[in-house]
Every structure is written in structure tokens, then in C-alpha cells.
Amino acid sequence: MELRTDEKRWLGLARACWSGRTSAGLPSAALTPPPSVAIGVSKQDIREQIWDYMESRNLADFPRPVHHRIPNFKGASRAAEHLPRLQAFKMARTIKVNPDAPQTNARFFVLDSKKTLLVPTPRLRTGLFNKIMPPPGATKDVLRKCATSQGVRNYSTPVGLDSRVLVDLVVVGSVAVSEKGWRIGKGEGYADLEYAMMVSMGAVGPETPVVTIVHDCQVIDIPEALLEDHDLTVDYILTPTRVIATGCERPKPTGILWSKISWEVMGKIPVLQSLRHREKQAGKDVTLRDEPRRLLGASSQQPAHLTAVRGPRDQPLPEPCPAQGEDGPTGTVCVGNLPRDARVSELKRALRELGAVPQRLTWQGPRGRALLHYQAPASAQQAVSRLQGLRLGAATLTVALARRQRASDLPGGRVQEPQPDCRPAAADL
């Protein structure tokens, strides 16, 4: 009988994921020995296989589905329990842990051990790090709250580029990782870029250990041919059943590879712009990937259309842009591109996680959108910044301030409520 494509994918991943190894007397989940990954496979192929497998076997917790995410796998807390036992952890004073859900318990252990916890800002929008500052005399329950995504927002202070911080241990999430220490993330490159930025600011060095925390099924063979110079490797892999010291000898990134960075990325990450200016002043080559094309025919070294890549997260607060109408900014945010099968409960849950809960929500699911009503325009603009890149299922949602209609366009010259127009403003294109 001919197997369907998805069935072949399950079978191939099952063979790769469950290698039959055991730890601490736990029963083996063996199927067959892991085969070599097929020739011609891509990083995205491996991501899709891992995501599909974890969904099909119900190995993940909220948020679901795990596609396009660092999976919040069942057993993440148990896997993190290995972290305090590592010698690298015991010796570390300052530890950077990524903000994803499966590393919540890892963040708690850092705080509970009275070490300094640094968490990258989501998508690097407002800087590189936040330092988590629990209230004096915090109990374990309070520390657990500080380790959550909401706690990271409520108990953090920004760490500037001039802070001279030294990071002794780095904890990252992964979609897939090999026992040799080769890692694949969710495809957006933030972990690799965070590490490269830490190198550039002198926060980490070649000997700084890197740990990842994953489900056992995420440990697979990865072809070395897929690795690139900017890819971050790991020294320790923690799973619910194992601690793997990779002994990885492949060099980690030695700084930011500016030739891999586009003007679009530069426009989204202000701290990256600051680091580029510093390195340019130091005489380093900071030519961007698309800079030669943009400079072609330009009369100066400044790219002619740099402002065209600015997104809503880069707009000044709370200054209104012309596309919002001359009657002032609105306190309503329009969320568009909702999947047909999306539920209002899923959106509400995501809003709670991201700290962007509105006073009122108008659900227009059949039309693929929802309106979020906030008390003040500044709150709405803050919500727009926090919700950039939000996904429900496989869909990336559009998020923008709803537009007011101008008084001159309406009968009697009266300003109407914001209109549910989720198209990006001209300044956002």
C-alpha cells in the first residue's frame, strides 16, 4: 500500500526521533535506529517534520499548534531540572535565558539560585536584554511569577549597550538539535543574532557555554552541510530523560555578519543600528546584504529609501501618522488575517500572554478580523508593538491602529468611531 506524504513524514521522523537510548532506568521509547537525514533535506523540512510529529503525538502544551514556534513541549519543567546540576550553571553568576514558554522553569531556577537573570526583549524591538528584578524578599511563588512571560514584563529593567555586562551561561530554545551540538531554530534567526550581538558588545566569548532544553524527539541527526557561519551551536542538551554534553568543536559566531543583515531587519531592531554605528566607528566593514543595490546611483552613503522599511513598531509614540486621519490617534487596534477556524478564546489567550488585554474586544471572525478597544491611544500603540509577529496557527496576523474617518468626509462633520481597516498604513509599507 502506498503511504501518503504525511505518513512517510511521520515514519521518517519517528525513526529519527526515538533512538532507543535510556537514562536513569527510564523505559526506552525505541522504534528503530535513527537513519541519516535524506540528501537534499533543508532546515525547513526538518522544522516541519518536528512540528508535525509533536502535534500528531500530542507532545506539546499551550500555545498550540507548535508550528513556527519554539515548541512548549510536555516535560519542559522536568528537562529544566537538569540545569542547576550542571557545573557551568553552578559557576555562573549571570545567565541569559530566552523568553519562550518551555524555558519558564529554567528562568525560575536562575532566580531561585540568586543569580542574575537576563532575558532578551521579544524580537529585539526595544533593546537587547532585560534584567529581571524580583521584589525584595520574594518567595518561591513570587519568583515563579517573575519567571513567566508576564513576570518578565512586570519585573524587568532594560540593560543598555554600555552596561559592560558579562554573561556566563546562555540558554536558548530549539526546534531541532543534534548530539553533535548543531542547532535549528524556528527560522527567524533571533537566537543567532542575539548571540552575535552579545559577542559584539563583549558580553560572551568563545568559552561561554550554551545550553538548549528540548523534548527527546527534537534530538535528531542534522547534516553538517546545512550549517552556516552565523548558526549558533550548543554545548549541552537537556531533555526530560537525558543530559547530553555535545563536545561541539565547531566555532560559534564571532560577531555580527553584517553581510547577512538587510535594511528591513535594521529598520526593525534599533539596538542593531546602534551596534552597527559603533562598529563602523571602529573601522569594521558593516556593509549590509542589500546595501550595494540601494546605494547604486545614490549621491551619499545613506540609502535613498531607508524610511520605506519602517514598520509600525518603529513609529514614534504617540504621534499620529497621516494615515490615521487628522482628527488624532485612535485607541482601537485592528487584528486581521485571522484564520477561518480561529476562535476568540485563542486570541484572548494570546493577548493575555503578551500583556495586551483590551478593555473590550469586537470579534469579526467570519470577516477574518477583530477590533481591540483600549482606553487610551498610547495603550493601543503599545499593544501594536507587542503584537507584531503574532501567529494563530500557521497564519501571521496583521496588527495596526484602526483608522478614524476625517470629520470633513462625514455628514455633519462628525468624527466616527475607528473603522476596521486592517491594511497597513502607507508609512508601514
Image (tube, rainbow, N blue to C red):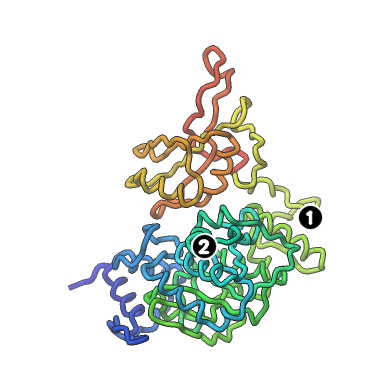
Q: Is residue 232 visible?
A: yes
Instruction: Please state, as top left, top right, bottom left or bottom right, where the N terminus lies in the image.
Output: bottom left
Residue lying at the far front in this picture: please name it: 137
Disc 1, disc 2: CB below 8 Å? no
- SS at badge 2: loop
- SS at badge 1: loop
**Badge 2 amino acid:** Thr
In the visual, does 154 lie left or right of 41?
A: right
Q: Is residue 53 above or below residue 178?
A: above
Residue 301: mark:
1
**Badge 1 amino acid:** Gln
Residue lying at the far left in this picture: please name it: 1
Quadrant position of residue 18? bottom left
In the rendering, at what x and y percent does residue 100 appear?
A: 49, 62
Q: Nearer the viewer, residue 202 or 366?
A: 202
Q: Is residue 226 visible?
A: no
In the visual, does 304 lie left or right of 320?
A: right
Quadrant position of residue 37? bottom left
The residue under the point 37% across, 58% down is: 64
Label 2 crowding class (10 Å Cα cut-off): few <14, some 14-19, many 20+?
A: few
Q: Which residue is mark 2?
A: 139
